[in-house]
């Protein structure tokens, strides 16, 4: 793709509105294309009605109820996207709006394959409420589940609080010039204070720090958290406030996607509920010469995995 394309997953929540606000700002800064997606979650309707096997009255009334709920949700999606499109025009942004039907997670995943970035809001409902309401749990855990499978960078937005900083965190094992290039090209037009944190312990951490310093502009701070100085270097590196965009490199294990420190991605996101996070998918390292081209040229494209 020559033009950046961002996918915004919308629902009617205030967190989704916050994600839309961020999406508008990013679209303008990156001169990108913005596509808003609303999913009629037909799988959730089947789960709600819960009629696997006909009981006293057969499946007829349930099928009728399914059609009523399905039509109502489609009407909600149409209203939601109409409102979004109107507000986008107020920001002088042209958008494409899309309604799909099916399992919520699968629909977003399939659509994400066509885009450079996925943006979602993040709800924060207390765990006890989630246990009482299975369907609320499904909705609130969407960003966490998507973080484990999204094929392109995933931006998780808990609020519309303005960002003043951006911090990339990686280990020697998860480092790639591709991830560094993604971080630099994504944040460059946003005019943020930028930091790159190399996390130890690794034998060659000093060499990695020097390598990164040679690749990034002088305005980017390059720091190291080593276990020799800190018992929990990764925890220290990701200890940021809500005005900092935290960019996390990930790795793929047999148990699923993990952070660069080996923590399951959904567990990590649970530990930082109020911080905006850009989750980078696992990717192979590229040659240093390629990333040098990226960091020296302002606003280079954010590459698709």
Image (cartoon, rainbow, N blue to C red):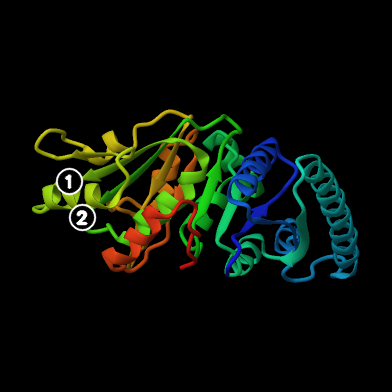
Residue 113 visible, this orientation: yes
* Residue 20, x across and y down, in percent: 68, 43
Residue at image point 58% right, 35% down: 125
Left or right of 219 on screen, residue 18: right
Q: Is residue 68 positioned above or below 277 on the image?
A: below
Left or right of 288 on screen, residue 203: left
Could you say whether the residue bearing mark 1 is in a helix, strand or loop? Answer: loop
Q: Which mark is residue 172?
A: 2
Place residue 72 in its image quadrant: bottom right
Residue at the extreme front: 297
Q: Quadrant of the N terminus?
A: bottom right
* Residue 166, x across and y down, in percent: 42, 38
Left or right of 111 on screen, residue 248: left
Residue at image point 86% right, 54% down: 78
* Residue 157, x across and y down, in percent: 56, 41
Question: Residue beneath label 1, please?
Answer: 200
Could you say whether the residue bearing mark 2 is in a helix, strand or loop? Answer: loop
């Amino acid at each position: 793709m020559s033009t950046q394309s961002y996918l915004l997953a919308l629902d009617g929540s205030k967190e989704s509105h916050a994600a839309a606000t961020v999406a508008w700002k990013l679209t303008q800064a990156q001169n990108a294309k913005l596509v808003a997606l609303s999913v009629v979650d037909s799988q959730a309707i089947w789960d709600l009605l819960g009629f696997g096997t006909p009981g006293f009255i057969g499946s007829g009334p349930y099928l009728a109820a399914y059609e009523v709920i399905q039509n109502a949700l489609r009407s909600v999606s149409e209203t939601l996207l109409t409102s979004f499109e109107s507000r986008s025009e107020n920001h002088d942004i042209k958008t494409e709006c899309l309604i799909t039907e099916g399992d919520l997670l699968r629909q977003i995943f399939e659509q994400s394959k066509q885009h450079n970035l996925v943006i979602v809001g993040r709800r924060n409902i207390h765990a006890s409420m989630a246990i009482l309401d299975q369907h609320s749990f499904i909705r609130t855990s969407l960003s966490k589940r998507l973080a484990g499978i999204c094929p392109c960078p995933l931006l998780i937005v808990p609020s519309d609080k303005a960002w003043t900083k951006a911090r990339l965190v990686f280990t020697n094992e998860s480092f790639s010039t591709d991830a560094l290039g993604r971080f630099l090209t994504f944040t460059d037009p946003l005019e943020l204070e930028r930091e790159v944190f190399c996390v130890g312990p690794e034998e060659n951490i000093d060499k990695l720090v020097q390598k990164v310093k040679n690749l990034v502009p002088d305005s980017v701070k390059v720091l190291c958290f080593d276990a020799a100085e800190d018992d929990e270097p990764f925890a220290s590196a990701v200890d940021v406030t809500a005005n900092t965009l935290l960019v996390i490199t990930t790795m793929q294990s047999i148990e699923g996607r993990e952070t660069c420190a080996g923590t399951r991605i959904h567990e990590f996101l649970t530990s930082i509920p109020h911080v905006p996070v850009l989750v980078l998918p696992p990717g192979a390292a590229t040659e240093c010469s390629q990333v040098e081209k990226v960091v020296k040229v302002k606003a280079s494209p954010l590459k698709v995995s």
